[in-house]
Image (cartoon, grey):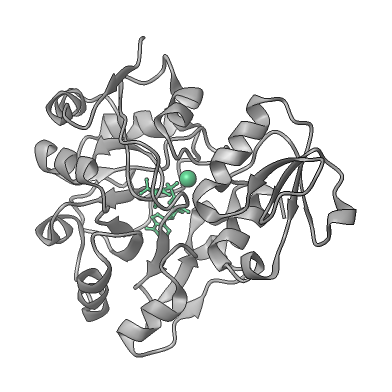
């Protein structure tokens, strides 16, 4: 099949394809998502097959209004409304009890559901046009770096995907912060551009952070992630660099240099593979080392 590349003005075509039961890739402010209507079990199953995603790894539901959250969640706690009011639309996923009506395939058998309202006009318009929440994992083959441009989506799915909306490069470049509101104290399951301190400011309490037992809380955390084919070595001084493809704050001669930041990290990892680099050296600077979300993705990509 030829993958149809749509513009942001062609939302109605994308919505029609989704209503026919075919997944469509859509841009968001974080990374591109592979979308399907939440109540279409067959389309949801197609997403797992296309990505090669383990069936116990739950999908995030994307909504365009708070009413939609009411349709797919059970009881919603007060922190949900405080955080939604402050950060939505935006890169924050809130895990809450799931409504019984939502197919169990969506949540990998769990009775919870992750919900977010993306901050991207095309994604919001698409959800509106389909008239129900869209589940969307990142639009990459499982284990590969997430896609932050339409080109990346095609690298993984050209010929195996009906349509893709090209919304340009993603603003944040890494996936949303995931916060569970299931236990008595909110728990950070995945760091992202909305930081722990910002969440704590709104809630007025300290939140927990999922440690080495994270797989218990967030199945996705136990799988290898964000990894290019080329091995990554993280180094702390230019003398330690072993590869000619270098990601660092400042350029270092004579290496091929790409700037180190969350927004472009995945694009650089994909580029290294595209040009056949046999290894990637990431030179950490003190400021980048303090960026929790960047460090989380880097260490996973490096297989740590
Ligand atoms: O920014 C994002 O979140 C992107 C865009 C497309 O919205 N989506 C994304 O989806 O990153 P995905 O499927 O690649 O990652 C979702 C993560 C996984 O680690 C999954 O285990 C966790 O969120 N998650 C989803 N629902 C959950 C739930 N009910 N309970 C615990 N963890 C959940
Ligand atoms: Mg993903």
Q: Vertically, is 245 above or below 202?
A: above
- Residue 182 visible in rendering: yes
* Most distant residue in the top direction: 1
The quadrant in which residue 267 appears is top right
**Residue 287 horizontal side relative to residue 177, left or right:** right
* Residue drawn at (79%, 32%) of the image: 278
Residue depicted at x 46% and y 62%:
192
Q: Nearer the viewer, residue 248 or 26?
A: 248
Tell me how many marks there are. Answer: 0
Q: Is residue 236 above or below residue 158?
A: below
Q: Left or right of 185: which side holds 14?
A: left
Name the residue at the right extreme: 239
Toward the bottom, the furthest residue is 204
x then y, percent, for residue 39 = 19, 40
Q: Nearer the viewer, residue 224 or 140?
A: 140
Quarter the N terminus occupies: top left
Residue sitting at 33 percent across and 58 percent down?
Answer: 114
Note whether residue 38 is visible: no
């Amino acid at each position: 099949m030829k993958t149809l590349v749509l513009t942001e003005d062609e939302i109605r075509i994308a919505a029609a394809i989704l209503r026919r039961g075919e997944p469509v890739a859509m841009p968001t402010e974080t990374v591109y998502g592979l979308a399907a209507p939440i109540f279409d079990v067959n389309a949801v199953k197609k997403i797992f097959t296309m990505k090669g995603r383990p069936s116990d790894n739950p999908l995030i539901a994307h909504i365009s209004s708070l009413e939609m959250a009411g349709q797919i969640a059970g009881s919603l706690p007060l922190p949900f409304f405080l955080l939604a009011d402050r950060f939505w639309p935006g890169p924050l996923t809130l895990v809450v009890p799931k409504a019984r009506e939502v197919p169990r395939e969506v949540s990998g058998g769990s009775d919870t559901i992750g919900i977010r309202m993306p901050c991207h006009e095309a994604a919001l318009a698409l959800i509106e046009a389909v008239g129900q929440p869209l589940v969307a994992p990142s639009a990459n083959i499982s284990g590969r770096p997430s896609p932050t441009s339409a080109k990346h989506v095609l690298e993984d799915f050209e010929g195996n995907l009906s349509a893709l909306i090209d919304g340009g490069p993603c603003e944040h470049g890494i996936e949303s912060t995931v916060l569970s509101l299931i236990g008595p104290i909110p728990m950070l399951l995945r760091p992202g551009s909305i930081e722990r301190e910002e969440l704590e400011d709104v809630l007025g309490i300290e939140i927990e952070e999922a440690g080495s037992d994270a797989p218990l809380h967030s199945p996705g955390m136990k799988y290898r992630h964000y990894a290019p084919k080329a091995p990554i070595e993280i180094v702390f001084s230019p003398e330690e660099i072993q590869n000619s493809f270098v990601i660092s704050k400042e350029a270092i001669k004579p290496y091929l240099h790409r700037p180190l930041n969350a927004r472009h990290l995945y694009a650089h990892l994909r580029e290294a593979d595209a040009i056949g680099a046999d290894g990637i050296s990431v030179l950490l600077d003190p400021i980048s080392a303090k960026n929790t979300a960047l460090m989380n993705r880097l260490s996973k990509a490096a297989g740590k």
